[in-house]
Image (tube, grey):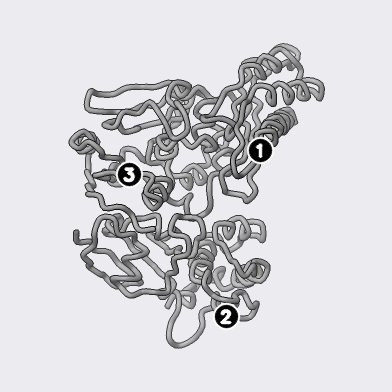
Amino acid sequence: MKLPAFDYACPTTLPEAVQLLASRDDAKPLAGGQSLMPMLAFRLAQPALLVDLRKLSELRAIRISDKGVALGAMVRWRDIEDDERLATAHPLLKAAVAHVAHYQIRNRGTVGGSIAHADPAAEMPGIAVTCDAEIAVVGKSGAQVFAAADFFQGALTTALAPDQIIVEVRLPPWPKNRRWGFQEFARRRGDFALAGAAVFYDEGAGGKAINAHVGVIGVGDRPLRLDAVEAVVNGQAIDEATIARAEAAAAAAVDPQDDIHASAAYRRALAGTMVERALKQAAA
Amino acid sequence: MPVRFEVNGKTVEVEVEPRTTLADCLRHQLRLTGTHLGCEHGVCGACTVIVDGAAVRSCLMLAVQAEGAEVVTVEGLSNDDDLTPLQKSFRKHHALQCGFCTPGMITTAHALLSEEPDCDAARVREVLSGNLCRCTGYISIVEAVLDARAAYRRDDRTQNKP
């Protein structure tokens, strides 16, 4: 478990970091390293150059405004946990991040690192997709903004070009009375979830759900929005009957694969259960 | 490449390859073998050290990233004169069997109690969930950490420092 050999650079400005990434064929940015370091240990990644982003303090800000919540790429889970403004500015984000990894990893793991790593069971990509986040990046040809839905292309695969660095993840504004729920199931708290669900909706006339967003993690090769479930929820009162229909629709909408952790059938059922529990939490 | 940081209050300067983890640097170059390596890929928590006040896994950090940081290892949480309250509590509660995971348990617990001396059992369990003990002594470890809280609540915390 010794890491492969690589060169190391620790730039102090973003343009310098971009230039370094573009300078070598197999250069990779290093954020918190909590996914990349294990990848190196297993030699799943063997970059020629690591460009450490730790001195780019402009990437550490959490900005909250009427445009929503902007998380700098180097914001750590710990920072989100400690930021009391987020309890009202984005409670779904805060609840989801409470499930990310263990104590020591939370002190180093970052928003940008998780988005770039794109583990299909990771919470942050799931929240980005569920909430229609924008992912702002810079590269040698300048700045670019991706919709989260277009950014994740498969397991550990994203639209990020080798010379691009994630700068910020922008979550749209969160209305005060929005209903939300986040649920996931992992065999050990802090481990990657076998499945998880993030849901939110607003209440329209008569308390019926509008603008429903339903996302799931851990049941496909990337985080997914489930249109079929949203269609079941929109326009309905979120009662037991609606929740039961949503659960069935979620299980029908996902197509998980067997792996060493769980069978496809189990994960399919679990996706339904997570959506059911998240909706119950939202409606409570 | 050269890297300079502080370990247990002393400034050190070492020459490392970029690929050297902080854990290997501490053990091999600085001979601080109290930091144990279990899995070497960020799962077991045995290699936990405290960097700038925060518990981190030293196998998931490069030595070169420690440049300018203040690192505390398990050696920095003891002194030659007496056991610290946390050490006493581990002994009292039989919170170790083989002892391999203990350095990570001690550093993690110290970081937690320094920041949250009033944490409850659920919080202790949540935090220690990142540290594997294969002798499965978790109940006694949790009890030891809970029992040590009182020492961290005092205004004069010096007795927890070496």
Residue A75 lies, with reference to residue B76, above or below; the image says: above
Q: Secondary structure at mark 1?
A: loop
| Residue linked to disc 2 | B88
Numbered disc in front, either 1 or 2 = 1
Instruction: Specify the quadrant that holds the C terminus of chain B.
Output: bottom left
Q: What amino acid is labelled 2 in the image?
A: Lys
| Residue linked to disc 3 | A30
Q: What amino acid is labelled 3 in the image?
A: Leu
First reached walking from the N terminus: tag 3 or tag 1: 3
Q: Could one spot residue A100 in this view of the protein?
A: yes
Q: Chain of mark 3?
A: A
Q: Secondary structure at mark 3?
A: strand
Q: Which is more toward the observer, A108 or B98?
A: B98
Residue at image location 73% in from the left, 26% down from the top: A247
Residue at image location 64% in from the left, 19% down from the top: A202
| Residue linked to disc 1 | A263
Q: Chain of mark 1?
A: A
CA neighbours of label 3 inside 10 A, class few (<14), some (14 to 19), many (20+): many
